[in-house]
Image (cartoon, coloured by chain):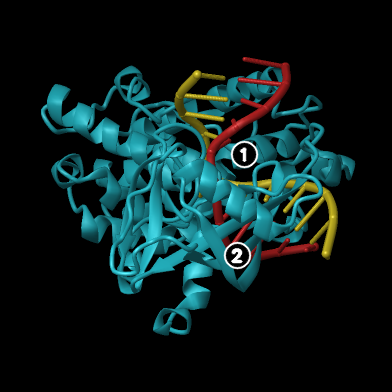
Chain colours: A cyan, B red, C yellow
Amino acid sequence: MSDSFAFVPLLLDWFATSRRDLPWRRDYDPYAVWVSEIMAQQTQMDRVVPYFTRFMARFPTLAALAAAEEDAVLKAWEGLGYYSRARNLLAAARKIAAQHGGHLPADYEAIRALPGIGDYTAGAVASIAFRQDTVAVDANVMRVLARVCDIDAPVKEPAGKARVVALARELLPPGRARDYNQALMELGALLCRPKNPDCPGCPVAAVCQARHLDIVADRPVLSKTPDITPLLVATGVLVHAGKVFIQKRLPKGAWANMWEFPGGRIEDGETAQAAIVREFAEETAFTVDVAAKLAVIRHGYTTYRVTLHCHLLRLAGSYDPSILPAPELTAAQESLWVAPGELANYAFPAGHRKLIDQLAGSLWSL
DNA sequence: GACTCGTGGTT
DNA sequence: TAACCAAGAGT
């Protein structure tokens, strides 16, 4: 910015009086700040807080996290999505325990080198936890600065983002990065929202170029959004001798290392029931009969909108009713027959968790 | 650069 | 309701 610009003082004054009382803002403990930043990626703070509180009770220190089992960390993350964040968080904790004496490094480059930490999170942790003069440019910051400074390039593309990052660096008040970064994000989250921004209530409205030009709705410039593909998926809850069959997904790809009921895509012209029978044959070598329809659950993820058809299954024909047979797994690393009440102890994708919750009680009396 | 990786809230 | 969006990172 060229002119003497009241933006930063106005922003900091506003944040001093209007910031939310988030748990990690009490003492800015580096471990707490780190966990909060990983949790907050691609979601919103209101959604993070209850997970954060439970996570810190379960893993109070970096040492406790480093010593944890991955299954326990995934269970604590269940429902938040992007589960590689949880696995990278654990991997980073172990790396810090082994290579940094159990303490988060304060240096930006050392933080940036940890798994699961990119430019944004490294800057956020360095500034918020350690008071380093680094920027932390997330979607809020890009939106706020695109409006205040009238950035006319798409901020989600590298060139546009580079402009915002350079701008954020120029504006950064030395020694105040902790408040400056959080204030930019807080303003974006509370007032300078994507839709229905509260310009009348905004502390920097007087210096906002988009506001002055009356083009707030046109900033930031958006990129094209990818199409959403409808996807039909079927899954089966196989019950035998009072136990339920679950399998642990492979260590790569979506929902890596999480538990699920077997299933898969319903092919063109195929019924949900047929798809389940086929998928169980392919993934477990079990021959199953569809006993009942349980639920239809709709959920979306990234570029898909899934309709999940859920059915109750029994082993077909020749299985000894008193023995829990072993599968031949092709799409999983491990499997278990568990009592219905034990399902609460395993981390499932949200769609399967919804199914379990819907079934609570009713089904298991069979 | 273009994909993948989740989920739930808002409009 | 369908579309858009969020304190992004890894490949």
The x and y percentages for residue A229 are 77, 43
Q: Residue at x 76, y 36 (%)?
A: A220
Q: Where A136 sits versus C11, above or below?
A: below
Examine the rendering and report whether any part of residue A71 can be seen: yes
The x and y percentages for residue A261 are 47, 56
Q: Which mark is residue A139?
A: 1
The x and y percentages for residue A213 are 88, 40
Label 2, label 1: how far apart the Cα atoms are: 37 Å
Q: Secondary structure at mark 1?
A: helix
Q: Secondary structure at mark 2?
A: strand
Q: Name the kind of residue labelled 2 in the image.
A: Cys
Q: Residue at x 38, y 47 (%)?
A: A327
Q: Name the kind of residue labelled 1 in the image.
A: Ala
Question: Disc 2 marks which residue?
Answer: A310
**Residue A169, quarter of picture:** top right
Q: Please, which residue is most extreme toward the front here?
A: A318
Q: Please, which residue is most extreme toward the left here?
A: A101
**Residue A236, quarter of picture:** bottom right
Q: Left or right of A155: which side holds A51?
A: left
Q: Residues within 10 Å of mark 2 (few under 14, many from 20)?
A: many
Instruction: Please identify the quadrant where the C terminus of chain A is shown.
Output: bottom left
Q: Residue at x 50, y 54 (%)?
A: A287
Both marks 2 and 1 on one chain: yes
Q: Where A241 sits versus A274, above or below?
A: below
The chain holding disc 2 is A
Q: Residue at x 64, y 19 (%)?
A: A162
Camera-nearest residue between A22 and A244: A244
The disc, 2 or 1, on the residue closer to the chain's N-terminal end is 1
